Image (cartoon, grey):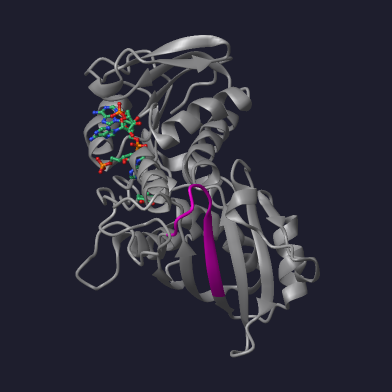
Amino acid sequence: MLKKKERYVVAVVGATGAVGEEMVSILEERNFPVDELVLFASERSEGKKIPFRGDEVVVKTLAEDSFKGVDIALFSAGASRSKQWAPVAAKSGCVVVDNSSAWRMDPEIPLVVPEVNPHDLKWHKGIIANPNCSTIQMVVALKPLHDAAKIKRVVVSTYQAVSGTGKKAMDELLKQTTDLLNFRSIQCSVYPHQIAFNILPHIDVFLENGYTKEEMKMVNETKKIMGDDSIRVTATTVRVPVFRGHAESVNIETEKKITANEARALLAAFPGIIVFDAPDKNVYPLPVDVAGKDEVYVGRIREDESIENGLNMWIVADNLRKGAALNAVQIAEKLIEMA
Ligand code: 25A
Ligand code: L14
């Protein structure tokens, strides 16, 4: 449990990665009560200096005693590192908010989006899991609709940016794009196929059932966060050549009828959502506009005319912020509020 203090010693593990860098800048931006910031990454980044509040913090590598005196640790260095180091951190008394997939479906570990299930923070035992990026932005929009009309089924297709995979993937999209525009041959190392000027129906690894792990994360994490196993979810997750900002086409079927206008009002009143929906003016959310923003943007809200009680919508959010770093910092803020 987090003890109430004026200021906290905060660690970021994976501080030089796409999400870790964002965590550091969000802590500064939001004036998080940081007493001291400690940054960790692999040997590759040891000694690197990262600016924070006009100062510089030197990046260190992890050791058994790294978390001594640390109150809150934000992890984003991949699942294998989290499996190894999150228990070490929790054991030394700090609260871990883990951005990897390592602990999300563990029944002993809460999986939290503060707008949706803050109550689940009450039963943590030292580790709290931050959900998958595509799932976070979707459940924020599903929650007010579920409360009003009970969602029976969700059909989602995603259009995911390369930054979800990390910095190497962003470099690969940039390199392939410039190579192709200069009539040079390209190399594929992060993704199995060309990502520049292309679309890949493949995120994370394939499983026995023919779905990808990313798709099954959306199915299973949605039920856990919403606290309702009866919601049926099916997903197709797709990589697009966009640097930042995940988009989703989401179809829902509800028990009770809600009109598009009622849905718009419910979504607009919910914290963390901006309804951006004026087709007559070509207004709908776009990854390039939503990059750098904190809210989940919802547009193209319309009734599904093929079923009794159905809605279609288009949901866009910054995958590095609400999808990862911001949600993790918001979890830490909630913990402080509850301490
Ligand atoms: O091992 P996994 O599970 O397959 O996951 C590794 C992936 O985790 C990504 C991460 O992106 C990387 O692609 N990731 C981030 N959030 C995730 C999430 N929610 C996630 N994966 C799943 N779910 P990244 O590269 O942007 O950030 C990785 C960060 O983790 C640090 N790190 C790595 N090993 C560590 C560690 N920190 C502590 N202890 C360890 N043992 C990593 O630090 C980074 O901060 P770094 O010093 O290794 O990275 C510095 C730069 O080096 C580049 N790079 C990474 N791998 C290589 C590389 N360069 C050359 N060769 C490589 N093999 C990175 O791009 C980074 O800029
Ligand atoms: O959080 O876009 O489980 O490649 C792992 C891979 C998120 C996205 C997770 C990607 C992800 C991701």
Q: Quadrant of residue 218?
A: bottom left
How many numbered circles are shown?
0
Residue 280 higher or lower than 225, as above or below = below
Q: Position of residue 13 (x, y in %)?
A: 35, 27
The residue sitting at 23% across, 73% down in the picture is: 209
Q: Quadrant of residue 18?
A: top left
**Residue 247 belongs to the span the image colors magenta:** yes
The residue sitting at 30% across, 39% down in the picture is: 78
* Image quarter hosting the N terminus: top left
Left or right, residue 6 beside residue 229: right
Q: Quadrant of residue 193?
A: bottom left
Q: Position of residue 19 (x, y in %)?
A: 44, 36
Residue 282 visible here: yes
Q: Which residues are magenta?
A: 240-251
Foreground of the two, 213 or 116: 213
Residue that extends furthest to the top in the rendered view of this protein: 55
